[in-house]
Amino acid sequence: MSHSDQSSSNTPLRRGQACLDCRKRKMKCDGARPYCGPCVRGNRQEDCEYADGPGRTRTELLEDSVALLQARIQELERPAETTPSMTLHDPHASYRNRQPNAGGSTGMNLGTTSRLPSSSPQIHRDFPPQFRGGPSPAPGISSGPFFGAPTFSSQGNTPRLTPYQGRGASAPLPRPAPSWWEAEEPPADIIQLLFNIFLPRGSQFGWFLSTRRFLDSALQPLPLWHPSRPLPVLLSVIYLMGIHFSGSPELAAREPLLLARVQSQLNSASVSGGGNGGVRHHPKRDMHMLQAELILAYYFFRNGRVVEGRYHVNAAVSLAFACKLNKVRSEADVQVAFGIGGLGTGLPPPVDEVEEGERINAFWQVFVLDRVWSAVMGSSAFISDEEMLLTDVDTPWPLERDVYQPGVLSPDRPKSSRTLAKFLNDPASEDTVEGFSITAMVIKSAILYEQATQVANRYKASNSQSDIQSLRGRSRVLITQIEQFIPTLFPLSDDAIAPEVVRCIILSQILARVALIQVYKAFGGRDGEDGRREALRVAEGIAEVLGRVDGTALVFTNPIIGTLLMTVCEVLVVHVKHERARRHSAVAPTARETGLVGSLEGVVGVMSALGTKCPFTRYQLGRVQEMRGGM
């Protein structure tokens, strides 16, 4: 049954039948299931739910979970003031007693040497000092035992807590110390919440692993350092991002301590092979380290700590090439590859399609992070796609993670070669299924954005006439390529689609269009007027796309979106000022000026929503407000 067939907009709804989101917003709801019309049009499907069913809604369950979590935190921090709920037997105590050094002691001295680079990359002049990063303090954390380790089960992508049936429960351990955050892992109920917060949004922040397999591994009732569980640093960085996303002041207060733990664990699990023996022989060490580096880089970028973010991008790039992830399903006979930094490790062949899909997605997540943020910072990308440096890219475009399942893809499907070079030669030409996935479209848009930004920056800085002519020729080619590529992007649809898909579609649309703006701004026609006019056309198109989306639905989008929207605002502000300069102050605004102001307000509104959760976007919004001050 179609969405329209389910609509009941022609008959008034009885009291209590509107969805919770429309009731909260005081909007008229049509009562359509599974998502009502207003929520679909506003791309708020994740918030559209009804309270008239037999069970409790997601929002009600989440509110219950948060309330229980707050109570649990209070119990852990102030045990003398609360009634104990339950104490559990620690099933791993005997294991740890027999393994005093298996994976490291529970105590962690975080006063180790920082992993920050000895020399920082060039910093873009637009970044203020407080957003240029620097060494982070690494306070010592003395970890106590992990009390109360219930078992978990996983169904789909959502972990479910089940009661722990431990042996010896009649002889409980003493109550945990108040400093629960200093344990090897958080209590089980907090772990559950943090997984549920981060994993559904993870693909915007570098997540490439199979979520189902990760949960099957992570939720086993085994010690933290057991090889059947994920690498400890990967768990810790997910806990960190879950806390960062949670909005809970109680959890946010522990963020610096958990960040210090992540940095310490990265030191222990470094690519050089040093550190803990359990880490060194972990079967998934390289892929889990790569995943942790990506997530940590996004954490720093979201917080405006761009130097530290760029450093972890560099580490991720080095590890990706050491693992030869640029040669997955390559036509070339790849025997030995030396990644950036001279590492030649490689990985064993993937065991199945799921593992191969993880490697394909891993490479492109690293690639996008490197290319996009190098453009933002005005520096060269680490990944150069050069055969002489063994950095040429043969890995095919990625499919969505869930598609990589045993038996879904043919083992005889074609090999791949020069994926990036072919795309840059003709972005609108594509003859593979993978090349049309939503994930691939985001990556392609990011490539065009990086290319356009780098060409524009080189043109602005060039004093050589021959270089200027060459760059002008390149700009004309880029404009044609991007204009032909944009129609191939997935459009926003009125159909009910998952919020994560909406975020991907919006990001790809904006990346490609801002790429056009970058070229038009730098390479205008006569007196630059043609370029400014075309840049405005594109900026208004972006504002129109954003007008169809509730800004709150984009809060957990890749943090690059704030930079993109600031570029859009710059174009709109210039033209609003131009329109106002053409009329006398006593004359009423023209329809053109009113339309431009409306477009600007819409983009600023989205940035404001993003800024509630992302400090870096909040800073960029401040710059936009400064620009508007002179209007």
Image (tube, rainbow, N blue to C red):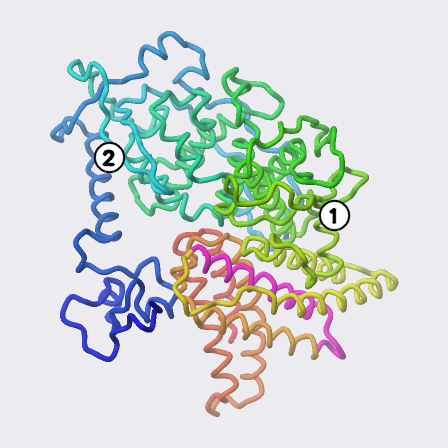
Query: Is residue 134 in sight in this rendering?
Result: no
Q: Nearer the viewer, residue 347 or 411?
A: 411
The residue carrying mark 1 is 418
Question: In terms of secondary structure, where does tag 2 sit?
Answer: helix
Residue type, numbered disc 1: Arg
Query: Residue 308: horizontal and vertical position, in percent?
Result: 56, 39
Residue at the far top: name it.
Answer: 98
The residue carrying mark 2 is 73
Q: Nearer the viewer, residue 196 or 140?
A: 196
Query: Residue 94: horizontal and vertical position, in percent?
Result: 32, 10
The numbered dot on residue 248 is none
Highlighted range, magenta: 500-528
Label 2: how many residues lie within 10 Å, few (<14), some (14-19) or many (20+)?
A: many
Q: Quadrant of the N terminus?
A: bottom left
The numbered mark, 2 or 1, whose residue comes first in the sequence reads 2
Query: Residue 98: horizontal and vertical position, in percent?
Result: 38, 7
What residue do we see at 66% from left, 39% from top? Answer: 328
551 versus 229 height, above or below: below
Snapshot quadrant of residue 195: top left
Residue at the far left: name it.
Answer: 83
Query: Is residue 233 in sight in this rendering?
Result: yes
155 versus 493 height, above or below: above
